[in-house]
């Protein structure tokens, strides 16, 4: 299929069938129109959804940067994801195909999913859930996780999903910040053949943050776990009660009512609870999904992320359901029991589109092509990548071995804050391996220096977004000042959004993301803050000070390197280093466990006391430490 590849430009062209059937055929002209009349473009997209009441104003920018979209409108995302499909043939279509790691399979039609969600919404109400209160969800990747999210949204209670791979402190901190009274969890899930202990972690977290009054647990693994009287209830017991059968109507929420809180790591210690809304988020995710992944009624879609991250919120749950797609979900590890697990499921279920992370691709690439080659992957039409820059070798392997050189790869750049894709190819666009291509409709994006001057073409600089978009996070829960400071302060005069990434743009207008400019570390595509890891280390009695940095790693993108200063009376030893690593794992989760941990007598700091992580990084990599004039004596 060499004719699809132009080596002189290192460009890959889309196959004819994709061009013929694409939902969007001409990017440039539609892009131009969307920029000339941004509000008109988004209003037209919004009209494709069902509203209880139409909006008065598309964009309200009277309180910048606290933008409002579709204000005055009444909508519930669940009405668009489930209720409206009950009126047509989508009702009988598969909404979810789920496979557990042990091999158990469950499927839900749109009708069945709606029924389950309605029942659980009744249960939540019966347990005292109120509109507007944040409900925390801490679950493995099982269908009930999706049911729980949708049931919260249905009654207008924002959900706060905490990734099931997080541990005690991470969970406790998020419960506390959101002041959640209700926690939905499970006894555990299966990962690499073993049951995880979610309820046990949840029990410890509930002890640390005392706000939880009701805990509902799904029985998944059947492992023994402690259930506290009058606080803890089994999901299945509650769902079996007559109260579950009441007719729960979907709450008519305002466009700007919060749909969910999602915590993400930033530069300072405490994770930020980003707030997304019912209206703008529904419009933005539904549009980006339909245009970028070219979704067709007969498609089976697999976003192999965890619903606990923004990728899962937007593109496992909400956008696919709004578009009436069939969603594939898998509970466990990609290489369990063998490295062909994913490829066998693509063949078994006839998956048409696979969306995953560079880390997952690199991880599977390690085992060689033969695992994929023994499966018929001809159902695939499109591929996708997200979470970190994809290196050209991994891109080519994905393209050739998995996509058989006929499935374009949508390398989508976006963030928890943006709600949906911001820079992305469309299926009709020529692709360059490693580039996320061009801005999505309505978005003007640029690369600028610290003073806001556009850098020369090809030069590295700060990635900024010049305009508001409907899917943007509206604020940080309980801390609007931090929202302003983190994203809008730097280019306040211009009113631009600072993404926190550095990037460059080439002669064809293609964007190349380089990485974070702040102290956010991307490990296997997961986002962690240096400060989070440091505060976990300092919570150990032996540690007086700590610094965490990310170092490049071929497989995981980055790995964590920690430098620790011990308190008096503690002696450095390999055993203590291991104990500290395990401590971080126990507090935050396995993804945060440092790969290296070294002891030191002091940390390089500026005169104002800030840790110079740049110096630590250079030292760990054996590089020149650069300008040290600001270093404290
Ligand atoms: O550095 C960018 C990287 O992931 C960051 C956002 O992380 P998070 O909020 O966890 O959301 C991840 C999933 C949307 C960005 O600031 N990133 C995300 N997608 C890409 C990427 N870097 C390069 N290429 C991408 N396609």
Image (cartoon, rainbow, N blue to C red):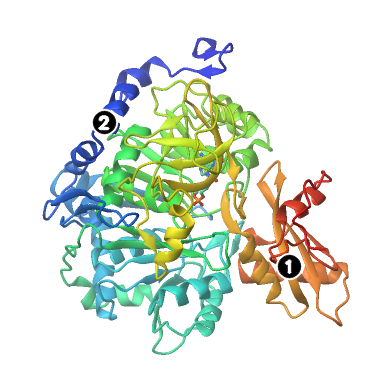
Which residue is denoted by mark 1 in the rendering?
Answer: 546
Observer-nearest of 530 and 497: 497
Picture quarter containing residue 49? top left
Q: Seen in the image, is 82 located left or right of residue 454?
A: left
Of residues 358 and 529, which is closer to you in this image? 529
**What is the x, y in percent for residue 147?**
33, 61
Q: Earlier in the sequence, mark 2 or mark 1?
A: 2
In the rendered image, is residue 542 in sight? yes
- The CA distance from mark 2 to mark 1 is 50 Å
**Which type of secondary structure does the marked residue at label 2 adopt?**
helix
Residue 263 is labelled as none
The residue sitting at 13% across, 52% down in the picture is 56
Residue furthest to the bottom:
229
Whether tag 2 and tag 1 are in contact, CB under 8 A, the answer is: no
Q: Residue at x 56, y 27 (%)?
A: 433
Hey, which quadrant is residue 177 in on the image? bottom left
Q: Is residue 28 above or below residue 612?
A: above
Percent of width and height locating residue 621: 80, 46
x, y percentage for residue 554? Answer: 70, 41
Say which quadrant the C terminus sits in: bottom right
x 47%, y 29%: residue: 437
Say left or right for 273 vs 620: left
Q: Mark 2 vs mark 1: give the one in front.
A: 2
**Dot 1 alpha-carbon crowd within 10 angstroms: few under 14, some 14 to 19, many 20 or more:** many
Whole-percent x and y of residue 197?
57, 71
Q: Residue furthest left?
A: 53
Left or right of residue 87, residue 391 in this image: right
Q: Which mark is residue 36?
A: 2
How many labels were placed on the picture?
2
């Amino acid at each position: 299929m060499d004719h699809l590849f132009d080596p002189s430009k290192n460009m890959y062209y889309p196959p004819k069938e994709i061009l013929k059937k694409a939902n969007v055929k001409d990017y440039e002209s539609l892009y131009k129109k969307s920029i000339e009349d941004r509000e008109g473009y988004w209003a037209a997209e919004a009209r494709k959804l069902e509203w209880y009441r139409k909006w008065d104003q598309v964009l309200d920018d009277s309180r910048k940067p606290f933008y409002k979209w579709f204000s005055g409108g009444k909508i519930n995302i669940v009405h668009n994801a489930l209720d409206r499909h009950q009126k047509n043939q989508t009702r009988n279509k598969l909404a979810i195909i789920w496979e557990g790691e042990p091999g158990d399979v469950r499927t839900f039609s749109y009708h069945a999913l709606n029924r389950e969600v309605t029942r659980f919404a009744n249960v939540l109400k019966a347990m005292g859930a109120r509109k507007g209160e944040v409900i925390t969800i801490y679950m493995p990747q099982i269908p009930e996780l999706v049911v729980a999210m949708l049931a919260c949204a249905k009654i207008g209670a924002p959900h706060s999903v905490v990734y099931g791979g997080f541990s005690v402190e991470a969970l406790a901190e998020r419960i506390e910040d959101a002041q959640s009274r209700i926690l939905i969890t499970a006894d555990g899930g299966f990962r690499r053949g073993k049951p995880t202990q979610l309820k046990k972690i949840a029990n410890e977290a509930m002890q640390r943050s005392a706000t939880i009054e009701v805990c509902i647990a799904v029985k998944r693994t059947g492992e023994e776990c402690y259930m506290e009287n009058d606080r803890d209830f089994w999901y299945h017991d509650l769902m079996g009660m007559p109260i579950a059968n009441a007719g729960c109507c979907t709450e008519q929420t305002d466009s700007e009512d919060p749909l969910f809180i999602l915590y993400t790591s930033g530069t300072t210690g405490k994770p930020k609870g980003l707030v997304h809304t019912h209206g703008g988020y529904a419009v933005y995710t539904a549009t980006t999904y339909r245009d970028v992944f070219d979704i067709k009624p007969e498609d089976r879609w697999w976003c192999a992320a965890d619903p606990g991250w923004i990728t899962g919120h937007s593109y496992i749950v909400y956008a696919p359901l709004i578009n009436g797609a069939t969603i594939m979900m898998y509970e466990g590890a990609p290489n369990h029991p063998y490295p062909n697990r994913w490829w066998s499921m693509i063949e078994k279920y006839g998956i048409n589109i696979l969306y995953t992370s560079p880390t997952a691709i690199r991880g599977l690439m390690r085992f060689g092509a033969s695992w994929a080659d023994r499966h018929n992957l001809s159902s695939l039409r499109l591929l996708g990548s997200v979470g970190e820059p994809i290196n050209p070798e991994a891109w080519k392997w994905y393209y050739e071995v998995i996509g058989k050189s006929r499935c374009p790869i949508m390398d989508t750049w976006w963030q928890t804050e943006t709600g949906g894709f911001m820079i992305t190819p469309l299926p009709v666009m020529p692709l360059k391996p490693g580039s996320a291509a061009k801005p999505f409709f309505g978005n003007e994006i640029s690369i600028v220096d610290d003073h806001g001057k556009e850098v020369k073409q090809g030069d590295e600089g700060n990635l900024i977004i010049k305009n508001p978009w409907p899917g943007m996070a509206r604020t940080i829960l309980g801390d609007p000042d931090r929202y302003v400071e983190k994203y809008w302060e730097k280019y306040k005069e211009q009113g631009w959004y600072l993404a926190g990434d550095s990037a460059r743009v080439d002669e064809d207008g293609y964007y190349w993301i380089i990485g974070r400019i702040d102290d956010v570390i991307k490990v296997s595509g997961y986002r962690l803050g240096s400060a989070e890891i440091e505060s976990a280390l300092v919570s150990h009695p032996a540690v007086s000070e700590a610094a965490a940095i990310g170092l490049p790693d071929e497989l995981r993108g980055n790995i964590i390197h920690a430098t620790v200063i011990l308190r008096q009376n503690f002696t450095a030893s390999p055993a203590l280093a291991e104990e500290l690593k395990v401590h971080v794992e126990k507090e935050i989760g396995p993804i945060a466990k440092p790969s290296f941990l070294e002891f030191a007598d002091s940390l390089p700091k500026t005169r104002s006391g800030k840790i110079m992580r740049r110096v630590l990084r250079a030292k760990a990599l054996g590089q020149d430490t650069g300008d040290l004039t600001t270093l404290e004596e």
